Image (cartoon, rainbow, N blue to C red):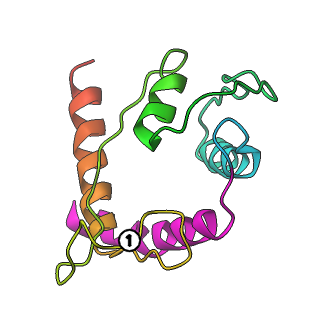
């Protein structure tokens, strides 16, 4: 499984960099959603889009990504977990926050994410 995860690591790093270089507001992430939908379709998967109501705008107080993600989970089952991309030599409480110009992600954590998702997929598919 390590070899399989490593084989997709360059593409995953490129996706992360591209998406974070083109940030979008929650519920207005048509570019990001389009990239994900296009890739899933290329794998032969059926894709549901516009599950958040398309251009619907709801004014709310500021919230974290997990809260945004949970909003969509009312319509489509999913999973969210934090990989922890703060470089080991830095204090997590002092580093710049995500989606800010000085933010830096230790991309080595992405391999952990690929492996975790692969194990979850195998576990789910094995139980069916």
Q: Which residue is labeled 1 in the image?
A: 7
User: Magenta residues?
Assistant: 1-24
Of residues 36 and 109, the one drawn nearer to the viewer in this rendering: 109
Magenta segment includes 94: no
In the image, what residue occupies the spot 45% across and 27% down? 70
Q: Residue at x 51, y 70 (%)?
A: 11
- Secondary structure under badge 1? helix
As drawn, is 24 to the left or to the right of 120?
A: right
Q: Is residue 60 left or right of residue 86?
A: right
Quadrant position of residue 99: bottom right
Of all residues shown, which one is farthest toward the front?
61
Q: Quadrant of residue 26?
A: top right
Q: Nearer the viewer, residue 68 or 122?
A: 68
In the image, is 1 to the left or to the right of 5? left
User: Compared to 58, does 101 lie above or below?
Assistant: below
How far across and down, in percent of the image, does residue 47 sit?
65, 31
Residue 112 percent location from the top left of the image: 24, 61
Q: Which residue is drawn at the image coordinates 20% and 74% (left, top)?
A: 91
Residue 65 vertical placement versus 70 (above, below): below
Residue 17 on the magenta span = yes
Q: Is residue 70 above or below residue 122?
A: above
Crowding at dot 1, Cα within 10 Å, few <14 / some 14-19 / many 20+, comes out as few
The one of 45 and 104 positioned closer to us in this rendering:
104
Residue furthest bottom in the image:
89
Task: Considering the whole magenta stretch, tell me its main secondary structure.
Answer: helix
Q: Position of residue 2 (x, y in %)?
A: 21, 66
Name the quarter where the N terminus is drawn.
bottom left
Give x and y (percent) for residue 41. 66, 42
């Amino acid at each position: 499984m390590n070899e399989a995860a490593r084989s997709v690591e360059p593409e995953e790093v490129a996706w992360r960099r591209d998406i974070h270089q083109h940030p979008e507001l929650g519920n207005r992430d048509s570019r990001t959603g389009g990239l994900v939908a296009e890739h899933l379709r290329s794998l032969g998967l059926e894709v549901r889009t516009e599950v958040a109501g398309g251009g619907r705008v709801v004014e709310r107080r500021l919230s974290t990504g997990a809260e945004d993600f949970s909003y969509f989970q009312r319509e489509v089952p999913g999973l969210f977990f934090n990989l922890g991309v703060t470089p080991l030599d830095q204090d997590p409480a002092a580093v710049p926050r995500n989606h800010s110009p000085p933010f830096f992600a230790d991309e080595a954590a992405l391999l952990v994410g690929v492996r975790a998702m692969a194990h979850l997929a195998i576990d789910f598919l094995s139980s069916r």
